[in-house]
Amino acid sequence: MRQHALLIGLGLVLTLFFAGGAAKFYTIPLSKELDAIAYDYRLRLTMPRKVDDRIVILDIDEKSLKEEGRWPWSRDRMALLMDKLFDRYKVAVAGFDVVFAEKDESSGLKVLQQLGRNQLKSVPQFQSALEQITPTLEYDQMFASKIRGRNVVLGYYLSNSEDGSRSRVSGALPEPAFPPGTFKGRPIAFTHWDGYGGNLPELQKSAASAGHFNPLIDFDGVVRRVPMIVEYNGAYYESLSLAMVRTLLGTTKLTPGYAADADSSYAGLEWLNLESARGVLKIPVDSEVGTLVPYRGRHGSFPYISIADVLHDRVPLEQLRNKIVLIGTSAPGLLDMRSTPVESVYPGVEIHANMIAGILDQNLKQKPPYTLGAEVVLLLFIGIALSLLLPLLSPTKTTLLSVGTLCAVVFANFAIWQWENLALPLSNSLMLIAALFALDMSYGYFVESRTKRQITSLFGQYIPKEIVEELSEHPEQVSMEGDSREMTILFSDVRGFTSISEGLDPKELTQLMNEFLTPLSRVVYKHRGTIDKYMGDCIMAFWGAPLPEASHARNAILAGIEMQQTLHDLQPHFRERGWPEIRVGVGINTGKVSVGNMGSEVRVAYTVMGDAVNLASRLEGITKQYGVGIIVGEQTREAVPDFVYRELDQVRVKGKDKPVAIYEPLGLSGEVDKAVLEELKMFHQALRMYRKQEWDKAELQVYNLQRMAPQSKLYQVYADRIAYFRKHPPAEDWDGVFVFETK
């Protein structure tokens, strides 16, 4: 019970820690990052992904720059654009996501006026002509006259000074949406700016309205929100999207909406009301008076029309009639690209289009200030409940409860997002559930570590470290009792070890044994084998226990082949030490065996027993008879069909009545040389002739094989047998089986 009390106490501490982070007493960096990821994922998952043709983006694209020249264009072209949009295409409202901050002197009027004041001052004809053409060359005035009286909304940007330098101010600002003092005394964290880049005064005066196009950039550089209202010099200015909606709706009253009594100085701003003849639109805002951008989809969620096509009347009238038009750029060179949750490179003008559509559709996600309190209450409820329950449950029930709680929180959060339009935080809840689960399970881990140590102590000297770790993770799979299963057994023995040992003193013999047994044992471990025992110079290993393994036969063959190669690589070292050459024979067999703790009351060992084990030992013993390094049994060959094998013979080993086919693995299919395959084909033909007692044909084939490989003992074995059977023909019912009378 004391252990449970400790777990409960630690769980409550974790709960208070995450609740404090949610209450903004301190910052948990991971929580902020995970919340951003969760928000982006929910947004992408629920985006409509449909094109909204109510809003059209007139794109200053590469095509337009190619036709009209480098931006900015002369204002007479912009004046022409206004006539095209409002007179020909009858658009509802046009907004600019660009700033007209400098005077346009591209007409040459300034040069002509200078000539009129100097060189041509006394030329009446020039003065008269200059007076007549001046109105047509005053491009800024021309543009101003074309936007006057029309639903045109200009854009501008706000800025802050850096390093205490003087703030930069240019152009003119529109009338503020709220005058100074409107929000005096209220706890509202408006974004504050101390500089701006506005439009020429004559243009601003002529426009119906104007709005800033500054986004709120989050900690990771991503634009998820737009500040609907910002503060400059005590006054409050609206965004471009808000200004365009107000202009579209006509006479619109903008009023603040508070969380509590409007007369209370403690009430936070929760929404903005747009009141017009068409009704009331509510724009939810967060603590920074920002509104979440309701992205409809990736770049292209609104129709894009090249502005050059509008200027040259190449656009059908119905594509723009009564539409909301945004004039901006997607050309990379004009640097109006943003990082957003839907794309890392996204045109800024389309952010305003998404905001306009969201305001008109009233489809804006809310993140009101009270979500902070709601998250704290949820964390306390989850944390206290799990802290009390998890220590009392089994690991399985703990996992089910934790996963179930996590899924319920995610589902509820997503449901509130989808149907209530609330963007509630998610990361603190998920991290708290995960932390409580980890805390509870870690106790089980330390309690169970004793069992794992026992497993390590039992098997650590016999099986690879990786398998020991797997057994530790799944101790229930370990059975010390006898079990019958299909496994693969390997025997490896040094040829002529008796004569080798007689030529070395005991110390050198011990060193020699260590020098070759160690690397061969590592090969067994590498291929997930279990070393049963060392019998002098012999290694006995098996695959398929203590953990079941589907590829036990394959791993055993790979180990046998690598053991041969490892010994070959050791020979130069042995020669340097003055030791004799070491060769081993490897016998591998697959079949049903008994595995488990076997022995007596005095000593017990984890080992295997059965006919398949005995046959593996016999196969190792006859490798020297055929002059090959590895022999595998028939079941092993059938279990690993993707190897190339040489059938050596059909034999009856000592102690067995039933004949068995024996094979030499040559390598993986597709990796064996063509010459070896040709030689293999010839040998198998010779073997068939031999079994049919066609001695002449068989002898000729074996002779050809001996010419190809004169050192091969296998071919000499068959040459000797054929010579013997010529003189002593076998019985008529001879089955081609060779009988070994010795082990």
Image (cartoon, rainbow, N blue to C red):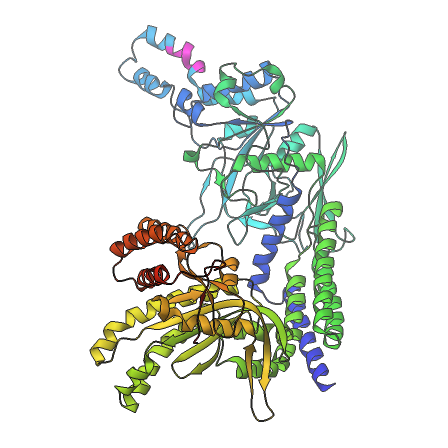
Figure check: 227 above or below 721: above
Residue at screen point 26% across, 75% down: 581
Q: Is residue 367 visible?
A: yes
Quadrant of the rendered structure where residue 549 is? bottom right
Q: Is residue 482 left or right of residue 527?
A: right
Q: Is residue 525 visible?
A: no
Residue at screen point 29% across, 54% down: 705
Q: Position of residue 255 (x, y in %)?
A: 72, 41
Is residue 14 one of those drawn in magenta? no
Q: Which quarter of the rendered picture does the N terminus lie within?
A: bottom right
Give the main secondary structure, helix, strand or loop, of the magenta stretch: helix
Q: Which quarter of the rendered picture does the C terminus lie within?
A: bottom left
- Residue placed furthest toward the bottom: 602
Quadrant of the rendered structure where residue 244 is? top right
- Which is nearer the eye, 646 or 99? 646
Q: Is residue 639 left or right of residue 692?
A: right
Q: Position of residue 678 (x, y in %)?
A: 34, 49
What count of labels does the image hold? 0
Q: Position of residue 58 (x, y in %)?
A: 53, 26
Figure check: 13 above or below 735: below
Q: Position of residue 387 (x, y in %)?
A: 72, 73
- Which is nearer the eye, 295 or 189? 295
Q: Which residues are magenta?
A: 130-136
- Which is nearer the eye, 460 or 58? 460
- Which is nearer the eye, 488 or 521? 488
